[in-house]
């Protein structure tokens, strides 16, 4: 099987999984889980969101130091301070990923970010370009992707790849899409983003 056909396993148990009621984990518990995942051969482990708390920063740092096989990853908003926190927590690893994101749906851009389309596009360019200074392994997500207009989504994906993103994640942030709709979205991206062959497409779905 060629690298082009390989399916990479990206686990976000210690980041997104912690948002489930009653699912919070201590630093020690996260380290134990990461060791199991490392032994299992999980390709990428999203260890946390370092900017959010000292505990998350500590967990990401400890996990990044201990992994032998898996690639540690930290989450960052489209802000330099978030990306800096990711780098500082991951820099002890021989290789690591920075995963940066920004909302692209009309409802999120208006009510969550209070940003225009143009401002979001500028933020994508700045954040991905900045993250690329620290690692060649940059993942970019269009938060609330399944409620984003397809033309705008394709525009931001093309930009993110041009700025250095090597993985493009499409998240169904609010559990909005059914499988058939999600499949059509991925197909549309593959057919309408001219440089999509330069990136891996990642899916982040929610079953609410």
Image (cartoon, helix red, strand yellow):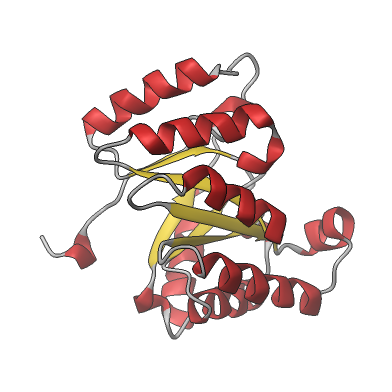
Quarter of the figure with the C terminus: top right
Left or right, 26 with respect to 1, comes to right
Residue closest to the eye, 197 or 96: 96
Image coords of residue 24 (percent x, y): 60, 18
Please tell me which residue is depicted at 51% across the width and 36% down the height of the picture: 60
| Up-down relation of residue 192 to residue 200 (above or below) | below
Q: In this rendering, does residue 208 appear at all?
A: no
The residue closer to the viewer here, 102 or 137, is 137
The x and y percentages for residue 198 are: 36, 77
In the picture, which quadrant includes the N terminus?
A: bottom left
* Position in image of residue 56 (x %, y %): 60, 31
Q: On screen, 133 above or below 39?
A: below
- Residue lying at the far bottom in this picture: please name it: 194
Identity of the residue drawn at 38% across and 46% down: 93
Q: Residue 23, how many percent across, how many down?
A: 58, 17
Residue at image coords 55%, 18%: 25
> In the depicted view, which residue is nearer to us: 27 or 16?
27
Q: Is residue 203 visible?
A: yes
């Amino acid at each position: 099987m060629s690298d082009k056909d390989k399916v990479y396993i990206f686990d976000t148990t210690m980041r997104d999984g912690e948002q489930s009621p009653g699912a919070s984990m201590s630093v020690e518990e996260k380290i134990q889980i990461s060791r199991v995942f490392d032994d299992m051969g999980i390709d990428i482990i999203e260890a946390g969101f370092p900017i959010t708390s000292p505990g998350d920063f500590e967990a990401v740092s400890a996990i990044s130091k201990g992994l032998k096989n898996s690639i540690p990853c930290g989450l960052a908003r489209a802000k330099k301070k978030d990306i800096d926190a990711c780098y500082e927590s991951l820099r002890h690893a021989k290789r690591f990923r920075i995963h940066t994101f920004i909302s692209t749906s009309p409802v999120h851009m208006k009510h969550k970010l209070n940003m225009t389309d143009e401002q979001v596009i500028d933020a994508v360019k700045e954040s991905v370009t900045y993250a690329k200074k620290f690692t060649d392994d940059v993942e970019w997500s269009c938060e609330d992707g399944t409620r984003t207009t397809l033309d705008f989504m394709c525009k931001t994906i093309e930009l993110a790849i041009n700025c250095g993103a090597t993985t493009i994640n499409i998240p169904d942030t609010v559990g909005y899409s059914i499988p058939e709709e999600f499949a059509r979205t991925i197909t549309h991206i593959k057919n309408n983003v001219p440089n999509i062959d330069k990136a891996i497409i990642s899916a982040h779905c929610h079953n609410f």
